[in-house]
């Protein structure tokens, strides 16, 4: 099984392979998103010296199934004065864009289905569903488009908390997107390509070639913007219970709400993969550890970091977020880009 | 011995910390330095450190706080006033109540009902004794007034039931005869908890 040799002797990527990959991503990431809720509850509980879910199944593992059943069987309510079309479409936007974004990032190693399996035998399943040459741009753009979900949902539901949530979505979007773009610009200049595979190749020279050493500032900026992008604490303004009930998701119930949830967790995974590929050496082998294990470890670390931060830090006010993004992070990002450019010229 | 040491009322070991809240900066430069200072001070990582430390304490040092309630229960104070119990004499196993009726008389919500009669030895016998727990306010007067330490408050605080009459008949409250050896002696109304000394802040007797 070739895991990391994406350049060169690649077998031909067929439509069947991409389709299989798409199904794999959908199935596995949905499952991981469900498992992520379990992990989040457990980790948060441990950090607060609680036990978390324990009763359903061993160690509470089947809690995911119980939650899933609950989500699917809940009454699906569309509020009377809501714009029902937009209300119904909005969660689909969030979930769909989250998964479309995953099409552009490498998820799991590539492999060839063994010959002895009928029909599909011999099909090469690529690590990346669609290696567009503007990979990063595509992923970031898709995740940004995903913000339409909360925005439309909040405005369509005829609920004041929803409206506030939508307004916060707008300002959050306006704030962090600049930082995300600018912080990624510096590594992009270094690599000279937007393809994530080129990023991976550029960092194949062991731990010293990771971009986090060359671009620590960009890494921190990207991490901060990534937290804002995925609505995680300390930037979970959109649905902060203590302030706006559930923000944009106030009127949602059942599976529609579940789609927002899955979208959020898929986004967390995407951001983790992006951070791992762009700054932490991607899926290159690390010593004796295979590349695909490395990327899983890195993604797991970033996922854990998000939960960790949620347990530790309070969240900021919307105006503080704008202040932070526009007055602090953006100038730093610009300076970082300029300095990178000067260093490259010299 | 002077009076001074009696006047010192802070006998305990409390360590109050006074928060040092500085004034918010006024000038733009002062604001900038404050932001820069806070940014590079690493306070955020202290927060991260605390949470991860607590996680390790909880997972590996047995400092998990959760009490799995229906399976394990916290001890309650001996002064807790829950469902009443009628105690028995330890020697004979006979119930202690002498049917004096003081508890019925003092009960401020009038929820104790009792009937007594003379038995064959011309001694008073309790023929009926019920407490209407729908009305009882668990004030504890009945336990306080009882001359025989017969009626006491037990530790049974889970009082949900299907029947209004649950727990409230004389036989229900009476210590089962086979559990006589397990009967907890009641320290009397207003008994202090066993760890009372730890909980009480010493204050001087003279001022
Ligand atoms: S606790 Fe108070 S209200 Fe309840 S039976 Fe005793 S005296 Fe009456
Ligand atoms: S006060 Fe005590 S002894 Fe007298 S009737 Fe009530 S329970 Fe019995």
Image (tube, grey):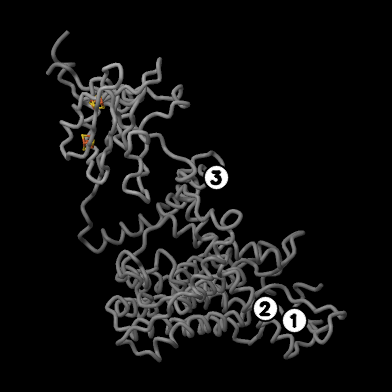
Evaluate if marks 2 and 1 touch, with contact meaning CB atoms under 8 Å apart: yes
**Which of pointers 2 and 1 lies earlier in the amino acid sequence?**
2
Spot occupied by residue A322 in the image (x, y as percentages of width and height): 33, 73
Return the residue found at the far front.
B120
Residue A106, located in which quarter of the rendered image?
bottom right
Label 2 in the same subunit as label 1: yes
Q: For numbered disc 2, what is the local secondary structure?
A: helix
Residue A11, compared with residue A234, is above or below; it is below
Dot 3 surroundings within 10 Å: few (below 14), some, or many (20 or more)? Answer: some
Would you name the residue on which mark 1 appears?
A125
Q: Pick the residue in front: B36 or A16.
A: A16
Spot occupied by residue A19 in the image (x, y as percentages of width and height): 69, 86
Would you name the residue on which mark 3 appears?
B59
Look at 65% across and 74% down and name the residue there: A107
| 3D distance between C-alphas at marks 3 and 2 | 35 Å
> Pointer 2 indicates a residue of which chain?
A
Image mark for residue A24: 2
| 3D distance between C-alphas at marks 2 and 1 | 10 Å
Q: Pick the residue in front: A296 or B126.
A: B126
Q: Is residue A20 visible?
A: yes
């Amino acid at each position: 099984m070739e895991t990391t040799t994406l350049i060169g002797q690649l077998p031909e990527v067929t439509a069947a392979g991409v389709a299989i990959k798409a199904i794999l991503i959908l199935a596995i990431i949905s499952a991981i998103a469900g498992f992520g809720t379990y992990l989040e509850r457990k980790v948060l509980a441990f950090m607060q010296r609680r036990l978390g879910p324990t009763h359903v199944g061993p160690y509470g593992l089947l809690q995911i199934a119980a939650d899933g059943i609950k989500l699917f069987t809940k009454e699906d309510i569309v509020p009377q004065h809501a714009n029902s079309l937009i209300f119904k479409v909005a969660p689909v936007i969030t979930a769909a864009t989250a998964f479309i974004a995953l099409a552009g990032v490498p998820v799991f190693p590539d492999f060839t289905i063994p010959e002895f399996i009928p029909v599909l035998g011999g099909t090469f399943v690529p690590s990346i569903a669609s290696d567009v040459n503007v990979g990063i741009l595509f992923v970031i753009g898709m995740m940004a488009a995903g913000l339409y979900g909360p925005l439309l949902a909040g405005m369509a539901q005829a609920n004041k908390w929803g409206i506030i949530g939508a307004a916060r979505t707008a300002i959050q979007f306006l704030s962090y997107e600049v930082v995300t773009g600018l912080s990624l610009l510096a590594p992009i200049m270094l690599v000279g390509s937007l393809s994530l595979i080129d990023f991976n190749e550029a960092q194949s020279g062991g731990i010293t070639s990771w971009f986090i050493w060359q671009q620590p500032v960009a890494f921190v900026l990207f991490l901060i913007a990534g937290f804002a992008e995925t609505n995680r604490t300390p930037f979970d303004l959109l649905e902060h219970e203590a302030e706006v009930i559930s923000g944009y998701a106030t009127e949602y119930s059942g599976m529609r709400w579940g789609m927002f949830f899955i979208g959020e967790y898929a986004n967390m995974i995407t951001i983790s993969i992006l951070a791992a590929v762009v700054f932490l050496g991607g899926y290159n082998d690390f010593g004796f550890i295979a590349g695909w294990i490395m990327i899983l470890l890195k993604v797991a670390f970033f996922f854990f970091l998000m939960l960790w931060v949620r347990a530790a830090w309070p969240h900021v006010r919307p105006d503080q977020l704008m202040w932070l993004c526009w007055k602090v992070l953006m100038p730093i990002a610009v300076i970082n880009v300029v300095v990178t450019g000067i260093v490259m010229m010299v | 011995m002077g009076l001074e040491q009696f006047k010192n009322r802070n006998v305990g070991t409390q360590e109050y910390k006074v928060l040092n809240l500085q004034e918010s900066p006024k000038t733009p430069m002062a604001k900038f330095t404050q932001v820069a200072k806070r940014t590079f001070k690493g306070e955020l990582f202290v927060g991260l450190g605390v949470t991860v430390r607590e996680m390790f304490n909880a997972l590996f040092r047995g400092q998990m706080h959760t009490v799995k309630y229906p399976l394990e229960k916290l001890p309650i104070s001996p002064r807790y006033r829950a469902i009443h119990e009628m105690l028995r004499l330890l020697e004979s196993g006979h119930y202690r109540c002498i049917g004096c009726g003081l508890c019925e008389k003092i009960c401020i919500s009038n929820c104790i009902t009792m009937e007594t009669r003379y038995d064959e030895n011309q001694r008073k016998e309790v023929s009926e004794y019920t407490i209407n727990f729908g009305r009882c306010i668990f004030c504890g007067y009945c336990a306080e007034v009882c001359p025989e330490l017969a009626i006491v408050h037990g530790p049974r605080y889970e009082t949900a039931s299907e029947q209004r009459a649950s727990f409230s008949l004389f036989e229900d409250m009476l210590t089962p005869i086979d559990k006589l050896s397990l009967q907890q002696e009641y320290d009397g109304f207003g008994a202090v908890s066993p760890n009372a000394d730890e909980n009480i802040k010493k204050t001087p007797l003279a001022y």
